[in-house]
Image (cartoon, grey):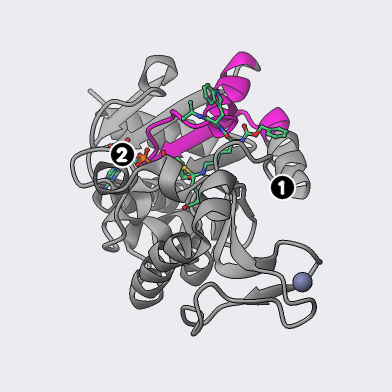
């Protein structure tokens, strides 16, 4: 009898256009807190006070202090085995794109090439008035930082509640979702839209949904396969099984 993870390996190997949707849970094992759940950020801080345009207008310094704390944490963190496993899956030609809700840079640092960041990038600051943007390699010195071009406030380059997702990334997301015959959903609660609708788009087109999460989420009900466990443990095992299959096939062909 095949174990569920082996059935998932079969499905991934058969797929023609596999995509992935990742959330905060994939970076949890790198020491970056998730948003919801027991130790989640929203337990200690209210989203409405920190992650909305209104919160920023009310108190830009407070918002920047919170983002500076998170920027420092992300700069100190390293990609974990789950980020590397997805980069390997892309190198193998199986995974075609990762759509991530994460604002950290751990997928990039693990070597993922086709990455679509739908909630922006915490390591970027952008002007609230002009088109100036700046890459951050440390938290800004002066809080809140000002635009060197026009003097207006700079803001974190992330997507807050009530804001539209960046058009280029949203278009790329829907193009990929409409091509996909399978999706690997890793470490997301599936409560934030439009991200949470992506697995449903794949499913409605006849594609399969694989979910990896430490506990059931809002996606689980539509998942064809649910593997419960830490992404940093499950995904490397999946790669190992896929590798074994590919080696067996090669040996069978006398290669
Ligand atoms: C592990 C693990 C391990 C742990 N291994 N797993 C109804 C009412 C009100 C509003 C709305 C509504 N319907 C839609 C909306 C709008 C809103 C929304 O979705 N609200 C819902 C909450 C209800 N959406 C928006 O506002 C979006 N914009 C929009 O819709 O625009 C429309 C528009 C068009 C035109 C003009 C104007 C507007 C924008 C959403 C932006 C989300 N922003 C945030 C903050 C980003 C910046 C920052 O980082 O500060 O994005 S919120 C936060 O949630 C962050 C995340 O990307 C996002 C998703 O969270 P995620 O990744 O799922 O994390 P968690 O913590 O929820 O879950 C972690 C999971 O990992 C858990 O399941 C764990 O079990 C698991 N896990 N360890 C595997 N080791
Ligand atoms: Zn400016």
Q: Is residue 89 left or right of residue 228?
A: right
Q: Which residue is mark 1?
A: 166
| Position of residue 47 measured from the top left corner of the image (x, y, whole percent) | 41, 42
Q: How far from the left and from the top, in percent, is residue 223?
A: 41, 21
237 in relation to 48, above or below: below
Residue receiving disc 2:
36
Q: Are marks 1 and 2 in contact (CB under 8 Å)?
A: no
Q: SS class of the residue under badge 1?
A: loop
Instruction: Residue at 36% x, 69% y: name it.
Output: 69
Picture quadrant where residue 74 is located: bottom left
Given residues 108 and 165, the one toward you in this image is: 165
Q: Furthest-left residue in view? A: 38
> For residue 247: magenta?
no
Q: Which residues are magenta?
A: 177-204
Q: Residue at x 77, y 44 (%)?
A: 167
Near-viewer residue (144 or 192):
144
Q: Is residue 120 above or below residue 167?
A: below
Under circle 2, the secondary element is loop
- Determine whether, in the image, residue 64 is placed left or right of residue 16: left
Q: Residues within 10 Å of mark 1 (few under 14, many from 20)?
A: some
Counting the numbered discs, the total is 2
Tell me how far mark 1 sits from mark 2, CA to CA. Answer: 23 Å
Lower position in the chain sequence, tag 1 or tag 2: 2
Examine the rendering and report whether any part of residue 23 can be seen. Answer: no
Say if disc 2 is inside 8 Å of ligand 1. Answer: yes
- Looking at the image, which is closer to me, 207 or 2? 207
Quadrant where the N terminus is found in the figure: top left
Disc number for residue 136: none
Q: Residue at point 24% right, 38% down?
A: 37
Q: How many other residues sit within 10 Å of disc 2, few (<14), some (14-19) or many (≥20)?
A: some
Report the image quarter containing ligand 2. bottom right
Q: Position of residue 72 (x, y in %)?
A: 38, 75
């Amino acid at each position: 009898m095949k174990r569920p993870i082996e059935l998932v390996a079969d499905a991934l190997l058969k797929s023609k256009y596999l995509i992935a949707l990742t959330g905060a849970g994939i970076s949890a094992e790198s020491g970056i807190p998730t948003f919801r759940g027991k130790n989640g950020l929203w337990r200690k801080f209210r989203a409405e006070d920190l992650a909305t345009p209104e919160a920023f207008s009310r108190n830009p310094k407070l918002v920047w202090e919170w983002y500076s704390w998170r920027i420092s944490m992300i700069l100190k963190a390293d990609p974990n085995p789950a980020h590397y496993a997805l980069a390997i899956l892309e190198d193998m030609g199986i995974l075609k794109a990762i759509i991530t809700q994460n604002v950290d840079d751990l997928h990039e640092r693990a070597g993922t090439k086709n990455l679509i960041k739908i909630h922006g990038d915490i390591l970027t600051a952008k002007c609230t008035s002009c088109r100036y943007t700046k890459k951050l390699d440390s938290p800004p010195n002066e809080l809140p930082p000002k635009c060197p071009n026009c003097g207006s406030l700079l803001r974190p380059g992330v997507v807050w509640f009530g804001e539209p997702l960046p058009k280029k990334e949203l278009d790329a997301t829907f193009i990929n979702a409409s091509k996909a015959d399978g999706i690997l959903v890793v470490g997301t609660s599936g409560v934030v839209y439009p991200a949470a609708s992506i697995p449903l788009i794949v499913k409605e087109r006849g594609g399969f949904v694989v979910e990896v999460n430490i506990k059931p989420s809002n996606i689980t009900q539509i998942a064809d396969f649910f593997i419960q466990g830490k992404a940093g443990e499950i995904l490397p095992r999946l790669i190992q099984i896929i590798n074994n299959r590919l080696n067996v096939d090669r040996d069978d062909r006398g290669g």
